[in-house]
Amino acid sequence: MPAQRIIALDAMGGDHGPEVVIPGADIALVRHPQLEFRFFGNEAQIAPVLQRFPKLAARSKVVHTDVVVKSDDKPSQALRRGRGSSMWLALEAVQKGEADVCVSAGNTGALMAMAKLVLRPIADIERPAIAALWPTVTSECIVLDVGANIGASARQLCEYALMGAAMSRALFHIEKPSVGLLNVGVEEIKGVDEVRQAHAWLKEIKDLPIDYRGFVEGNQIGMGAVDVVVVEGFAGNIALKTAEGTARQIAEYIKAAMKRTWLSRIGAFLAQGGFRVLKEKMDPRRANGGTFLGLNGIAIKSHGGTDALGFASAIELGYDMAESGLLARLTADLISFHGKLEAAVGK
């Protein structure tokens, strides 16, 4: 039997607040009946929505607060004014051991700043990263960092490799995940100094729990060339949003082509089963949820504009991370790596 898990939800986060967060929790509860929920936010707004879902209400508790982090708040503003907010309290529930996972669709910068302060980085991690699931032609891969930081040192890129591999083991049950560094080419002379230095260390340091494959290019991500793609946050965020936009563009092309003539409409009708499978495969809601890796607790960032199904996916991602025992394995991997790195640099 799966263990009972408590999910702390920032009910006021995202574009729609409780109107999406609560139905999303209900979908997750149907799939995982052992879950319990803690909703943090304005009780006057939460209660009427929660009443529409009696089974969810029976397994939920509402913690009231009037303080909400705004979508346009800078991280520094959120830290000054956000203590006691729905976002802060949801993270604090994880820190206190009152919940296993925090999920928020709120301000990304504010959530990262608060998570670092409340949950604290593990094992001398300088910068936690946001890891995202990325659909490929084979299954899915993990890409990090997709927006937590601008730039990354060689050491941080190596840490991302270990963190992404730990997440891959947790979600995909791959004991030694394949890892690649995203670069402008696969040749060893290409790339900025930090990427080339990380490449050298990952090749040199032995007995890491990864199968390091070297450099990969952007067009190889969707082909499933590796299980984990490592990149600094600026380029990673651009790559992620470009891929999302391209998927929507292709969908519009297909829709328009299928409506051009009566013959194409007939073809579309006959192929509707195949199109349904394609739509499900390309649906960004299935892979919604960025994981903050490198913290003493599990925090998931949901897309702010997602719907209930997408928010449910973010909850399920957090549940899977908690069930896998990710944090203990990740901490051990990073402590081991730091020792080996110090030895390698000291040669």
Image (cartoon, rainbow, N blue to C red):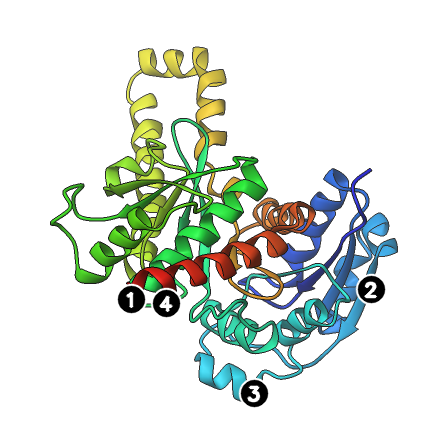
Q: Which residue is drawn at 50% across and 30% down?
A: 280
Circle 2 residues within 10 Å: few <14, some 14–19, many ≥20: some
Circle 1 residues within 10 Å: few <14, some 14–19, many ≥20: some
Q: Quadrant of the C terminus?
A: bottom left
Q: In which quarter of the image is the N terminus?
A: top right
The nearer-to-camera label among 3 and 1 is 1
| Residue, disc 3 | 81
| Residue, disc 4 | 149
**Which mark sits nearer the N-terminus, 2 or 3?**
2
How far apart marks 4 and 1 lie (CA) works out to: 6 Å
In the drawing, does residue 321 fall left or right of residue 174?
right
In the drawing, does residue 200 fall left or right of residue 172?
left
The amino acid at mark 2 is: Lys
In the drawing, does residue 133 fall left or right of residue 258?
right
Name the residue furthest front: 347
Residue 343: image location, x then y, percent? 37, 62
Residue 16, image quadrant? bottom right
| Residue, disc 1 | 151
How far apart marks 4 and 3 lie (CA) works out to: 22 Å
Q: Residue at x 13, y 50 (%)?
A: 190
Say which mark, if any, is on residue 61: 2
In the drawing, does residue 282 fall left or right of residue 2?
left
Q: In what element is the residue under mark 2?
A: strand
Q: In what element is the residue under mark 3?
A: helix
The amino acid at mark 3 is: Arg
Residue 164: image location, x then y, percent? 46, 49
* Mark 2 vs 1: CB contact within 8 A: no
